Image (cartoon, rainbow, N blue to C red):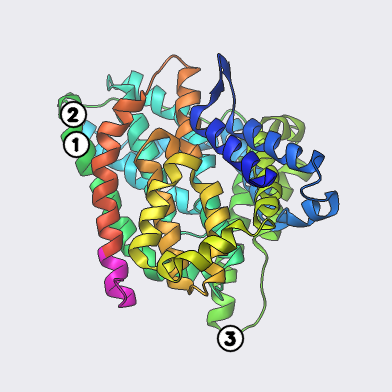
Amino acid sequence: MNLSLLVLLAVLALIAARKIGHIRVAIWQAMAGGALVVLAAGQISPAAALAAIDIEVMLFLFGMFVVGEALVESGYLYAVAYRWLSRVRTTDSLVLAIVVASGLASALLMNDTLAIIATPLMLRLALEHRVAPRLLLLALAFGITTGSAMSPIGNPQNLLIALRGPFDAPFVDFLRLLAVPTLINLVLVYLVLRVRFRDQFHAIPLVHKPVTESDPALAGLARIGLLLIVAGILLRIALPAAGVDVQLPLGLLALVGAAPVLLLSPRRLRVLRAIDWSTLTFFAAMFVLMASVWNTGVLQGLLDAAGRDLAALPTVLGVGVLLSQLISNVPLVALYLPVLQSAQAGPDTLLALAAGSTIAGNLLIIGAASNVIIVQRAERRGATLGFLEFARAGIPLTLLQTLVFWLWLSIMTGNPA
């Protein structure tokens, strides 16, 4: 067997197991180790490795992380959350508000970013309102995973599909096909949690403690950055609709949004130190390792053996949901995307891959990096969310959500097979 493929299998095993003996191995460490091995073994040249790294993805993630961390560091995000939640008076309304707000926000801020910044807020709300932390943590995890499906920047795998797929207007295409089933699936999140944790929905009125910004100056710069990104995204959507053939790179939009914080804030170094460098390392390493595996020709051989079946709607959804549990959704998409492109799959098929690989994160904790982020950040603050606890709510939810996407995509594309 080819060395690159052996290294990939070892990396995927580490990602699933998360440890070697008693030593815990982070996802980014496993992927970085794999990339270093194929480089050292000469399976891919340094020049080819550099060329494999998608700079636009890296710049976009960096810019979004800067803005997201500034929103947290300034206290602005928590202040906004409390102002909005101050109108919520029941546990029912609180859970529904978290699901809807996290779902809609993840379509803009990316689910991993929200997982990082919102987990402490969930624990604070749980303590303040005498609700089991696991309920609000699951509401956050399921909300951001589900909501991110309808946006090309909602999660990392969607970003890969949007940048590498045949989309003239990715924001319009994603919303056109995935917005309605995603909104239906957000309602399903609330209903499943309402049934699973019915004893936690008490009738005691909620009393909120006010939260203010800790750094108004940084908050102002973060708001400007966020508005610049939103304006850029809206402009990117509007230009093709108006017949203007100008592409605004997502990486550039994110850097423009990060510029006010990086250029004008005296706390820029603190923000830079706090951003999620491990995720950036994971992506750079993943691009290198996946390019090395693709160059072996193994995936191309798989395509020839399977014919067109790998591009069928049920197959794409099933592969996206199930294999993401073994190798996580981002590496899966990085491997599966070139296979579908070689099969000349159209935009609708790639959007089905986006849907399947995204809601895979609701099945088990290991299905998405955002779940792992939430669990790890909660554990550092004394709260736990177990594997089986997640699965008891996640398995029925994912089955229902997969059915919704399958039915909707079958109707919209006219191609259930």
Mark 1, Cα crowd under 10 Å, few <14 / some 14-19 / many 20+, is some
**Residue 362 percent coordinates (x, y):** 36, 42
Q: Quadrant of residue 174?
A: bottom left
Seen at 69% across and 58% down, the residue is 295
Seen at 63% across and 33% down, the residue is 30
Specify start and end residues of the magenta stretch as a single range.
Answer: 407-417
Residue 156, label in figure = none
Label 3 sits on residue: 243
Mark 3, Cα crowd under 10 Å, few <14 / some 14-19 / many 20+, is few
Seen at 73% across and 55% down, the residue is 52
Q: Give the prevailing secondary structure in the magenta stretch.
A: helix
**Residue 324 percent coordinates (x, y):** 45, 45
**Residue 401 percent coordinates (x, y):** 28, 52
Q: Amino acid under label 3?
A: Gly
**Residue 175 percent coordinates (x, y):** 42, 66
Label 1 SS: helix
Whether residue 154 is in magenta: the answer is no
| Pointers 1 and 2 in contact (C-beta within 8 Å) | yes
Is 275 rendered above or below residue 21?
Answer: below
Decide if residue 198 is in sight here.
yes
Label 1 sits on residue: 194
Label 2 sits on residue: 201
